[in-house]
Image (spheres, helix red, strand yellow):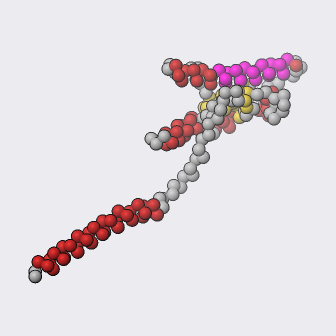
Amino acid sequence: MSLIPQTLHTEDATMKARFLFVIGFTLLPILAGCVDSPKSTVAKKAPIKTRETINKKTQNVLKLDEALKNGGVLAETGISVSDPLTQSAEAYRTSVGKIGAMAVEHAIQIRNAQNIADPKPLSYDELMSEIIKKDQPDGMQLAMLPYYQEYAWDEPNQKLVVVEFPEKKAQRRKEDLEERGY
């Protein structure tokens, strides 16, 4: 008789342990999903959107000083990579920027030649209204740059330059890795 209560007691403990084990593993995912993760106090940046560049045009020109304040740096005008795949892409980007700058310089030279009496330096607003002619049918159309680059007007030097935003490039690279599961 002494074995029966002990056997019942052992079976009862085993059943309780199994029951708690099953319940624990069943509720664990549910409870983990119900608990809110702590929210970050830093605002999440909007995802970077890439843009098509081939055969696309723009009239977007920034003020150089504002672009530099917003994290921009002057883009390199040389081709610094040696592998053939990225070399072609960098050559295209660099050429597009240079050709845009040459087109603006040519338009400024024509403007100055027509105004021989007073060929004055252009302010940003004059550039946009007289040379780029933003939102006008006869306006200058510059080739589209990659999502991390923009044209900018260097007023002291009277040149159109390309400004690169490394933060946009790094954020997009991070987003791309996250999309791929890395």
- Quarter of the image that includes the C terminus: top left
- In the image, residue 172 lies at what x, y percent? 55, 38
- In the image, residue 50 lies at what x, y percent? 62, 36
Give the residue drawn at x 46%, y 42%. 181
Q: Is residue 150 magenta?
A: no
| Horizontal side of residue 145 vs 125, given as left or right | left
Name the image quarter holding residue 53: top right
**Which residue sits furthest left?**
2
Image height of 106 relative to 169, above or below:
above
Count of numbered circles on the image: 0
Name the image quarter holding residue 95: top right
- In the image, residue 46 lies at what x, y percent? 60, 46
Name the image quarter holding residue 25: bottom left
Give the residue drawn at x 52%, y 39%. 176
- Quarter of the image that includes the N terminus: bottom left
Q: Is residue 100 magenta?
A: yes
Q: Nearer the viewer, residue 91 or 2?
A: 2
- The secondary structure making up most of the magenta span is helix
| Horizontal side of residue 151 vs 108, given as left or right | left
| Horizontal side of residue 139 vs 3, given as left or right | right
Q: Which residues are magenta?
A: 95-113
Image height of 31 relative to 68, above or below:
below
